[in-house]
Image: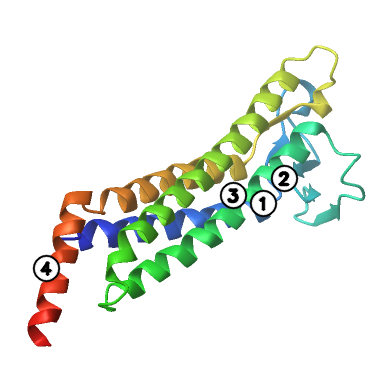
């Protein structure tokens, strides 16, 4: 018998993680200006994201500029883009599989395929979480290296932005939700016995 509560909790966590992944992808706050040295008091703050960079003035005005060329971006930013987009696409596939698995619950003919669909959905969500974790951690590693680079000026140093924390949180929630979906499936022995009982019941009605 399926653990419906674990499955529902896994779907909720996975959906929440996917939404958090979208927020992390869209917010232009992966790298923010560091308040060090001469930058303790600044008239403007620089935000850098995957798709654009923004400058926030002390008056509250914000000006954003979309990156002109993808090939002109640093290698770590290009990798973060690719990994994040891949995680988003895997999240869409995971949601579709989870919905298909939920529909199989009320369909007697397709109920035997439900464990495979739920397992596929869980594995897809886990893969999306791992991709986002790699993207956020890789970007954080490059920020730390640049921060301690003596060749850079204080105005060029960056710190962790809110998008990185959203990415780390979303990846953990996605992995947890996917793991719960995988754990909600019964063992193969229980699947076989359940399928046999279903066939026996249908023969009785015939």
Which of the two discs, 3 and 2, labels the residue nearer the N terminus? 2
- Callout 4–callout 3 Cβ contact below 8 Å: no
Q: Secondary structure at mark 1?
A: helix
The answer to the question of whether label 3 and label 1 lie on touching residues, with beta carbons closer than 8 A, is yes
- Note whether 66 is above or below 146 in the view shown: below
> In the figure, is residue 86 to the left or right of 50?
left
Real-space CA distance between mark 1 and mark 2, rounded to the nearest whole angstrom: 6 Å
Sooner in the amino-acid sequence: mark 4 or mark 2:
2
Residue denoted by label 2: 81
Say which residue label 1 marks.
Answer: 85
Image coordinates of residue 193 in percent, x first then y, are 13, 59
**Does dot 4 land on a helix, a strand or a loop?**
helix
Residue plotted at (76% across, 43% down):
48
Estimate the spatial distance between the alpha carbons at disc 3 and disc 2, rounded to whole Å.
10 Å
Residue at screen point 61% across, 57% down: 89
| The one of 102 and 158 positioned closer to us in this rendering | 102
């Amino acid at each position: 018998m399926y653990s419906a509560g674990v499955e529902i909790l896994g779907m909720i966590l996975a959906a929440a993680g996917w939404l958090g992944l979208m927020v992390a992808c869209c917010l232009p706050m992966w790298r923010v200006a560091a308040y060090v040295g001469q930058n303790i008091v600044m008239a403007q703050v620089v935000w850098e994201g995957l798709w654009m960079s923004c400058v926030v003035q002390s008056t509250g005005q914000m000006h954003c500029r979309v990156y002109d060329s993808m090939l002109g971006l640093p290698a770590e930013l290009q990798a973060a883009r690719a990994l994040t987009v891949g995680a988003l696409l895997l999240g869409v596939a995971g949601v579709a599989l989870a919905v298909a698995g939920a529909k199989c619950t009320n369909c007697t003919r397709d109920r035997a395929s439900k464990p495979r669909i739920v397992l596929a959905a869980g594995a897809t969500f886990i893969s999306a979480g791992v991709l986002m974790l790699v993207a956020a951690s890789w970007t954080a590693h490059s920020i730390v290296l640049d921060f301690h680079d003596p060749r850079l000026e204080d105005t060029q140093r960056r710190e962790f932005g809110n998008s990185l924390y959203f990415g780390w949180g979303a990846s953990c929630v996605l992995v947890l939700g996917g793991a719960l979906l995988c754990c909600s499936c019964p063992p193969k022995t229980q699947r076989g016995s359940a399928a046999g009982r279903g066939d026996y019941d249908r023969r009785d009605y015939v």
